[in-house]
Amino acid sequence: MNTQAFPFAGTTLTALPSGALSLPAEELLCVSDLHLGKSDRIARRQGLMLPPFDTEATLDRLDADLAATGARTVICLGDSFDDPAAADSLKEDNLTRLLQLQAGRHWIWIAGNHDPAPLNLGGTHLAAFHIGPITFRHAATPTTDYEVSGHYHPKLALPGAGSARPCFVFDDRRLILPAYGTYTGGLHGTDPALRSLFAPRAFAILTGRKTILAPLPLARPDRAPPVPLRRAMRD
Amino acid sequence: MTAFPPTFSDWFARRGWTIHPHQSAMLARADDPALLLIAPTGGGKTLAGFLPTLLELADGAHKGLHTLYVSPLKALAADIRRNLTTPVTEMALPIRVEDRTGDTSYTQKRRQRADPPHILLTTPESLALLVSYEDAPRMFAGLSRVIIDEIHALAESKRGDQLMLALSRLQTLAPGLRRVGLSATVEDPAAIARLLARNPDPCAILHADPGPEPDISMMVTDERPPWAGGGAKYAIPAVLDEVRCHKTTLIFHNTRAQAEIFFHNLWLANDDSLPIGIHHGSLSREQREAVEAAMVAGQLKAIVCTGSLDLGIDWGDVDLVIQVGAPKNVKRLIQRIGRANHRYNAPSKALLVPANRFEVVECVAALEAARAHDLDGDPRGAGPRDVLCQHILITACAGPFSADALYGEVRSVGAYATLTRPAFDACLDFCATGGYGLRAYDRWRRLQQRPDGLWQLRDPRAAQRIRMNIGTIQNTDLVKVRFRGSGMPLGEIEEDFAATLTPGDTFLIGGQIVRYESLREMTVEVSRAPGKTPKIATFMGTKFATSTQLSSRILRMFQQDSWPELPAHTASWLSLQRQVSKLPEADRILIESFPDEGRDYTCFYSFAGRNAQQTLGLLLTQRMETLGLQPLGFVATDYATLVWGLVPLTDPAPLFDATDLRAGFETWLKGNAVMKRTFRASATIAGLIEKNLPAARKSGRQATFSSDILYDTLTKYDPDHLILQITREEAMRGLVDFGRIEELISRTRGRIDHIRLNRVTPLAAPMFLEMGRVPIAGEARERLAESAAARLLAEAGLAGL
């Protein structure tokens, strides 16, 4: 697997091309914004019947990442389910699949804005989790150092190299993970809402076929994605 | 025959008109269930269509809607309303005529549904919307005639399929409905007739006098056309001379970008400041209307334009049509030529301007085809199923329906006459459940069956969303261009093009060079930037492929012993090619290989049209990669594909193995960007994804992103899904055009002439100058991204992280 190791909070973290974060020293895998059950929620709320394979596809990738890294602890950084109803209406086979992935692993559900309440599923339910100096929570708080979060669904395009891809964004103090869920949109890495959380010297690691490390450009309000995009990401 | 009452004969007499033979023929057959009139532009076609209606309505007895007129253009509907008002007012007929398009006000539209006019003029999309309302049965109950104008244009697209499906509904609501089609000259009138009539009703075809033969020739200039490119800049002085000595000239181009560049160059050379305007589909409505108004007022000497003027308002004063660039299709050429001298019985005058040396051959071939009345056109396949899916949803919006009855209606549409019941049921199932088999949403269906067996929307509120997404026209994602400050709209450019711009970049739009300032809320703000060389706007504009018929004609020309009909410079070019290599033949593939500057080049002359040659380039390089030939890139034109790589090609035969090519096509299709775009179009038409949302329009970029993910997910988890089947079907034509590669393989059957030379050949040389070189995809893209990232890291002094 083509991965990208990088230093953070005195340890080495590894970005996987799937968008998962591995802490090899802790045998830990962290994924954010799974949005399981999204197609179900869209069918329920909008009457659109998108291919109902997103949960399966997300769990397939998670399964592969767990097998490849041998992680014993899993942190889901919030918005693991598209909404509480989506968690309740998880299809039988997907639920079984999830339980199989949980078996023998320490599983931590961090609360997100889509799934704020504890879920009716095994594992530990927390608002935040700490390992050494690192804090894991759903949405970044400007005052916390060494914080790993999700929520923003960052993405970035490199000049002349096709459309934007989901990406990790980090500087010395903060790391934001891309959305891991199959049906998720993204917020451009140069959007002021996201860019302002980082120091001028910050990096992005693009995901996709391979991970690609690049500097994070400075905020470009002129190139900010249109409003509906941000709305789509929030709801 | 309907009697011609004195009111009408007096009116004709007052205007000094006599009724045309085809107009009386139309009257005589007014009771036919379907009738097709083929007439040149300006032949009194519209009046021929409306005369029976005016006669039937003259006594004032009919209440409600009598005649529906459908045209592909909003502007045409408004124009016809004005034209009809003249006879209605002058003969004091008790007839109300109104138009209804996307531009009609909300109150007017509401009133029209409550109290419809006698004659309603509309577009296919507005009609589909009307059919979706619960009150459609009341509104259309008394409908007696429908007139479809420019049916030849609608017949080429899904808009026509949607229209005919809507008519099948109307036919049920108004069983006596008679259909009339008005068409320009086409290669296969019977095909249009089958499309128009209710299957299996007969449909008589009436031909109006086609008028005198057009006067077409190729413009020969002292300056020789260049070897490649599409600008035709060399011809500008000659074109200006022609403009000067004619009243009004239309200068047609094949693409919007070419029109912009030509217009720009024309003005640089326009020392007399001749009033010349520009008109194409990317310009703002305000801009286009200003040009149209100036045209109607006779203030313009010439208009540089594109297909946006193929149809539409009758401009009597045009006395010359200039086609810049080879006409890729003879039928379109004839229709464009018809834009000159709309007055009946005046010959149309047209000049073809080849943009490069190969186009000289193409132009001469097109001229011969036009003189021989040898029109081209590819038969359309069965009715597209994505349009059917949308029709099922539209039907559900109007109220509960029976699947059996709807199937019967759909089969009465010519294009869907062979639709099987299982195929129909698959579309219905897709609309109802998403069509994912066992994986279907059980709780959140879109349509559900009532105990009495009728189908209806599960949630009636869904109707609003379905209505908002009616239509089959797929615009690429466009952003508006406005002047910063004044906010004056200039037009639209593709979002992808806008994304490549950085502040300070300049591009051409509406004949002006503008400077990119910023992109705010889906609007590009620009300022004036006179006197700079622009970075060219890559408008989408359709890239037409040369038709199969025209390609064969060119291949036949190649086999002549000499070419007296060609200018000397072009004839000697072909002779030289014959001397050093050979000229391509219709039933063989000519392949030339030669080295140049350390690369090995191979040129495949397969004459399959630009889109198929492009696809062939992708497939061949993929095969070459597998065979270890290390291809680096390729470029495609309408007649050939030039590939370059590191390893010389010795045996091309394995490259053309039909089975391998087809298998490669399947694999290649899965990850192809064109396929993803095709998928997005079909998924949007079929209602799998929505283009328009009640609150705000989803941004195009976001839609691109998510529909690509949907495509990848479906390909992986449900490869036989209906929408993927439709996507593959679409890929056989259109941008992928694999159908013509199949045609090429069966035409040549492995007969390959491979000629190895030590230098580039005359016929291949222009290929070196072609734009649009394609680097080999796959790993190359990763390499590009990685090197871009490395460069950025280095520039930022971060390389050692």
Image (spheres, coloured by chain):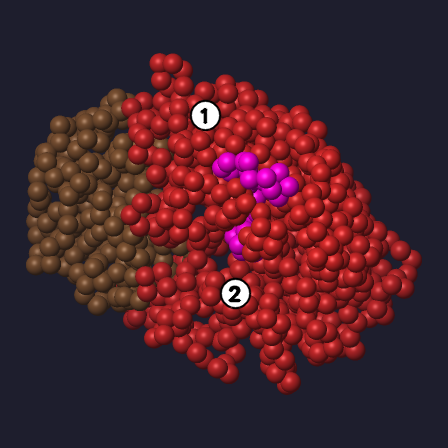
Chain colours: A brown, B red
Question: Which residue is painted at 45% across and 80% down in the image?
Answer: B529
Number of other residues with Cα within 10 Å of mark 1, as a class: few under 14, some 14 to 19, many 20 or more = many
* Front residue of B38 and B78: B78
Q: Position of residue B61 (x, y in %)?
A: 55, 36
Task: Establish if B589 lies above or below B495.
Answer: above
Q: Is residue B665 left or right of residue A185?
A: right
Question: Which residue is painted at 47% across and 49% down in the image?
Answer: B101
* Front residue of B650 and A161: A161
| Residue A26 appearing in the image | no
Residue situated furthest bottom in the rendering: B271
Q: Is residue B299 left or right of residue A231?
A: right
Say what amino acid the circle numbered 1 marks. Leu
Question: Which residue is painted at 80% across and 44% down in the image?
Answer: B587
- Quarter-of-image position of residue A122: top left
Q: Is residue B65 left or right of residue B412?
A: left
* Front residue of A101 and A49: A49
Q: Position of residue B18 (x, y in %)?
A: 76, 52
Circle nearer the viewer, 2 or 1: 2
- Disc 1 chain ID: B
Question: Which residue is painted at 31% across and 50% down in the image?
Answer: B696
Queried whether the magenta region covers residue B502, the answer comes back as no
The residue that disc 1 covers is: B428
Q: Is residue B322 left or right of residue A202?
A: right
Image quadrant occupied by the C terminus of chain B: bottom left
Element assignment for label 2: helix
Instruction: Give the residues in magenta.
Output: B53-79
| Residue A219 appearing in the image | yes
Q: CA distance from mark 2 to mark 1?
A: 41 Å
Element assignment for label 1: helix
- Disc 2 chain ID: B
Say what amino acid the circle numbered 2 marks. Arg
Q: Which mark is residue B288?
A: 2
